[in-house]
Amino acid sequence: MISVLIPTFNADVSPLVDFLLSQNDSSSFKMEIIIWDDASNIDIFGLCDNENISFFRSPVNMGRSKTRELLAEKAKYPYLLFLDADVLPVSTFFLAQYLQHASEYSILVGGIRYESEKPESNRYFRWFYGKAREEILVKNRLLKPYDHFMTGNFLVPKSIFLQFPLHDVITGYGHEDTLLGYKFQQAGIPIKHIDNPVFHLGLEENEVFFAKSKEAVSSLLRLKQLGLNIPSKLLNGYNLLERIKLVPFCALFYPFFESRFLKQYIFSGNTFSLFFFDISRLLYFCKLSLKRGK
């Protein structure tokens, strides 16, 4: 018995829902699908015609963490499968593979995959980053199971998930998965990685993704200010600059770096440097830290 929970915001969930319903038709397990729209302006009420689907909509934007918690509270089955709205499972035995490995004491992560064909240039940035940083083979994810936890495709017992509310900590975009993985590790809850990926289809335009990455930096700074020592290469880099007293200089350098380098290495869509992207986020972290106070 499984509750498939799909938080959505301005995304068409119908391809994912159609796939899930086709799997349930040929299987003996019980499944429900719950969709929670976070105050977007896309009408998907037509999906509610099926008795296995429930749909809810927030009157105002609640954020991804709160939406996931609302979905979990509505679920009637003991296992919660969280899927992002803009994904599509790779395997035709997707649900069966999760149920085969399900345990009431651990969490399962299936992984993320990106299509091999390169997208148009104005979306190349997001695709390149995903291929390089998020599409990770299961054997490599197993080496650092908590570091590679992602919320876009994971199965968790309801009894475990409801122990870790995050909506009062993460209010904006970014690092929900980082914090939740950290919380699971601190509580000693095993995370197991399996080869059961989904394609991430929702590729934002280059400028949109970069803006969201800046919002994620802001979320990471909030976690640092709350005293949460979460694992992060970006945070490690900032701590080093802080020790050698270079944060003010890096903060001043950020506007120049953004204007001179980002158009060439990110926004153009012709080339993309992970190095310059990481540097831009680190410099922006320095700028925000001075603005907000350490």
Image (spheres, rainbow, N blue to C red):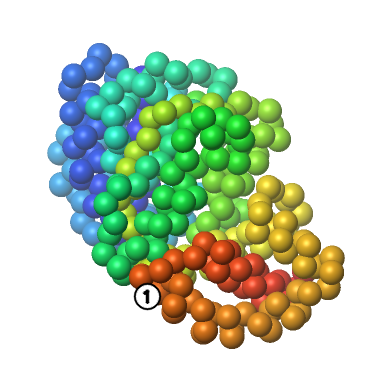
Residue 3 in sight:
yes
Q: Which residue is label 1 attached to? A: 268
- Amino acid type, callout 1: Ser
Q: Is residue 166 above or below residue 251?
A: above
Give the residue displayed 66% in from the left and 54% down from the top: 233
The reply, left or right, for residue 29 in relation to residue 179 is left
Which element is circle 1 on? loop
Residue 99 % position (x, y):
39, 19
Residue plotted at (69% across, 58% down) = 235
Residue plotted at (84% across, 65% down) = 243
Q: Is residue 14 above or below residue 92?
A: below
Decide which of 143, 103 is in the foreground and name it: 143
Instruction: Give percent across and percent down for residue 144.
Output: 61, 35
Could you tell me which quadrant the N terminus lies in? top left
Q: Residue furthest top?
A: 28
Q: Bin the neighbour count of mark 1 within 10 Å (Cα to Cα): few under 14, some 14-19, many 20 and up.
A: some
Left or right: residue 75 versus residue 246 is: left
Residue 130 sits above or below residue 217 on the image: above
Residue 39 appears in view: no
Residue nearest the observer in this picture, 9 or 46: 9
The quadrant of the rendering that contains the C terminus is bottom right
Specify whether 5 is left or right of 249.
left
Label total for image? 1
Image quadrant assignment for residue 2: top left
| Residue found 30% across the figure and 68% down from its top | 121
Residue 177 position, x and y percent, is 54, 46
User: Residue 201, how many percent across, how many down?
Assistant: 30, 50
- Horizontal side of residue 174 vs 16, given as left or right: right
